[in-house]
Amino acid sequence: MSQSIAITLGDPAGIGPEIIAKAFRDAPALMRGCFVVGDPETVRRAAHWVCEASHPVQSIALMESSRQAVDAPAQCIPVLAIDKLEALVEPGQISAHAGRHAARCVVWAAQAALRGEIAAMVTAPLHKEALAAAGPPFASFPGHTEMLQAEAAAYLGKSVSQVPVRMMLANEELRTVLVSIHMSLRDAIEAVTFDRVLQTLRITHQSLAWVLGRAPRIGVAGLNPHAGEGGIFGREEIEVIAPAMAVARQEGIDASGPWAPDTVFMRARATPVKTGEFDVVVAMYHDQGLIPVKYLGVEKGVNVTLGLPLVRTSPDHGTAFDIAGTGRADASSLLEAIRMARQLAQSG
């Protein structure tokens, strides 16, 4: 298998191109073997935005295939132009054209990863409104996770429901996996079902056992305050979550809880002076799981899609349209995503 890593451009109007240029500028050793999938002129413009007196503008090395990434010249940004923009898009502006370009880059990288042509893919941020404006088929996907799930299902000849995936957000101190991802809070509560909780536990166990080399210690958050307080504040813990955990434990999965969601993340947090009680927390919905990780530092968080037959990571932030084009965007989370992608690819 190739050892190259594809970095998708993200929305051309967001900070994706800038953090990519900064990553190549600031961490050349880490970026060796990485290449950008997207419009070369957008990357070239971003390289100008992030140049400094001590860091001259980087050249763009146009590639014809992913195999050339490893041999790309030093101090260059290798770019594979699978889809070129007809004109540069304005920073910070929602555009259907930009949404389509970003999505096409993701689809190309996913298909290349599924075919084994690249070791992993790292995705710069999409803008969900631009994606919705992009038209079919991209408008039907709320974000990266669902798009990648559909590509994997098509490649495997399965239905989307037969390729269950989960979002994990991780940094050095905390990991959390979500039962539901991008949906309204009302719908997310309805999504806390026996099958979805059990499926999440299975995916979490299998994925992290692969990374850790042992069974992960999984702490499970309750849905309700105080994990329902014995049914006083809700019965989902008693009627849904605990039964799913019982089946998981029968399968050898080390899952404990359901624990009060306002304290389980603190218990799982690993610090230089304390090992966390859990290797990962399974959270019941998007904000319950992501707020604790992001509070510890967006610049260090990494989004990992579990359950896919490929390695995909992403920075823990959005397109930041408000600062796009200024050169001020922080590339730390992207660099962490690339480090984790390498680790996951090597683990496989």
Image (tube, rainbow, N blue to C red):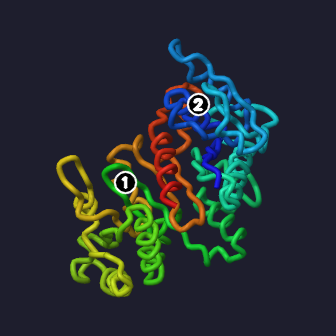
**Residue linked to disc 1:** 291
Residue that extends furthest to the left in the rendered view of this protein: 273
Residue that extends furthest to the right in the rendered view of this protein: 86
Task: Determine the image quadrant of residue 18.
Answer: top right
**Residue linked to disc 2:** 21
Q: Residues within 10 Å of mark 1 (few under 14, many from 20)?
A: few
Amino acid carrying mark 2 in the image? Ala
Residue drawn at (77%, 59%) of the image: 136
The mark that comes first in sequence, 2 or 1, is 2
Q: State the image coordinates of residue 222 (x, y, percent, origin top left).
A: 31, 73
Residue drawn at (51%, 64%) of the image: 306
Quadrant showing the N terminus: bottom right
Q: Residues within 10 Å of mark 2 (few under 14, many from 20)?
A: many
Amino acid carrying mark 1 in the image? Ile
Q: State the image coordinates of residue 259 (x, y, percent, origin top left).
A: 25, 72
Vertical position of residue 156 compared to residue 316: above or below: below
Residue drawn at (31%, 63%) of the image: 279
Whether residue 218 is visible here, answered yes or no, is yes
Residue drawn at (73%, 50%) of the image: 104
Task: Determine the image quadrant of residue 161.
Answer: bottom right
Q: State the image coordinates of residue 347 (x, y, percent, origin top left).
A: 48, 58
Residue 290 placement, left or right of 221: right
Assign a secondary structure to mark 2. Answer: helix
Task: Determine the image quadrant of residue 71.
Answer: top right
Q: State the image coordinates of residue 234 (x, y, percent, origin top left).
A: 30, 80
Assign a secondary structure to mark 1. Answer: helix
Whether residue 317 is visible here, answered yes or no, is no
The residues tagged by marks 2 and 1 sit, at their Cα atoms, a distance apart of: 28 Å
Asked whether 347 or 174 is in front, the reply is 347
Asked whether 34 or 226 is in front, the reply is 34
